[in-house]
Image (cartoon, rainbow, N blue to C red):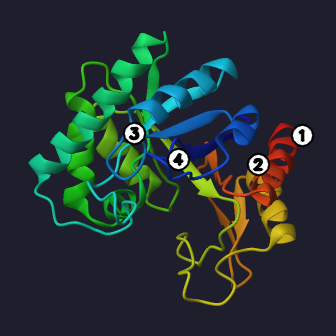
Amino acid sequence: MTLTLNCDLGESFGSWVMGMDEAVMPHIDLANIACGFHAGDPLVMQRTLALAKQHCVRVGAHPGYDDLAGFGRRSMHCQPEEIIALMLYQISALEGMAKAQGISVDYVKPHGALYNDMMAKDEVRQAVLQAMAAHHNPPILIMQATPDADQHRCEAEAFGIRLWFEAFADRAYSDDGRLLARSKPGAVLDHRQMLVQAEQLAHQGRVTTASGNTLALQVDTLCVHGDNPQGVKAIQELRRIVQG
């Protein structure tokens, strides 16, 4: 199966501009649209949805913690019922605006610290799955591809939720199948290494870890970043690799 490319978009708000959405959108498959808590605002959401529709890109909700000042990158101690409510609120906001343009919201990818907490903490992951299951038309959930993929798929199936697993072309992996901590040398790959890793993921379903071992990963989609012209160019190159 051809890997899809997903990108976080719609993260501007007010007079603050984040990302190069118009340049990125023609080259991706999945647009993860901010829902106003960590970034985005109603007008930006509306414009990003219209841009996705113009380029026939599938739309997903990108909910985060209520942390506009910290861009959703700070972990917050929330009770499970708070996580369920904040996710449903954000998904519903994007879904309502999408429906006005004749667009469906097909999946959900939590943002930043909420995503990290979902992967690291059982209670947060369970709350996320409960929120998805409580939706009137449960969307697909994007999670990080790790050696725990089978366990996570079983957890999701118990809630009637389908998963897509994502990998990162520009991040090094450790032998346990998780991302190498940014504090360690070589955690972020250079341009050439990124393209090599994308090629390996797309055509072999494997990555070579920082120590040189080869590791199989269940991957459906690659996360890409288009915050600058170099990032947009890299997305174009990754598009050719996954389609090749």
Q: Are marks 2 and 1 in contact (CB under 8 Å)?
A: yes
What percent of the width, then of the height, locates residue 21? 65, 41
Q: CA distance from mark 1 to mark 4?
A: 21 Å
Q: Give the residue number, with chain letter if any, for mark 4.
A: 165
Q: Are marks 2 and 3 in contact (CB under 8 Å)?
A: no
Q: Which of pointers 2 and 3 lies earlier in the amino acid sequence?
A: 3
Q: Which of pointers 4 and 2 lies earlier in the amino acid sequence?
A: 4
Q: Give the residue number, with chain letter if any, for mark 3.
A: 41
- Of the residues shown, which amino acid type is indicated by label 1? Gly
Q: Give the residue number, with chain letter if any, for mark 2.
A: 202
- Of the residues shown, which amino acid type is indicated by label 3? Asp
Q: Which of pointers 2 and 1 lies earlier in the amino acid sequence?
A: 2
Q: CA distance from mark 3 to mark 4?
A: 28 Å
Q: Nearer the viewer, residue 181 or 63?
A: 63
Q: Secondary structure at mark 3?
A: loop
Q: Give the residue number, with chain letter if any, for mark 1.
A: 244
Does residue 144 show up? yes
Q: CA distance from mark 4 to mark 2?
A: 13 Å
Mark 1 or 3, closer to the camera: 3
Q: Indicate the quadrant where residue 66 lies.
A: bottom left
Mark 3 crowd level (few <14, some 14–19, many ≥20, 10 Å Cα):
some
- Of the residues shown, which amino acid type is indicated by label 4? Phe
Mark 1 crowd level (few <14, some 14–19, many ≥20, 10 Å Cα):
few
Q: Secondary structure at mark 2?
A: helix
What percent of the width, then of the height, locates residue 233? 84, 52
Residue at the image point whose x is 57% and y is 22% from the top: 50
Q: Secondary structure at mark 4?
A: strand
Q: Quadrant of the C terminus?
A: top right
Q: Which of pointers 1 and 4 lies earlier in the amino acid sequence?
A: 4
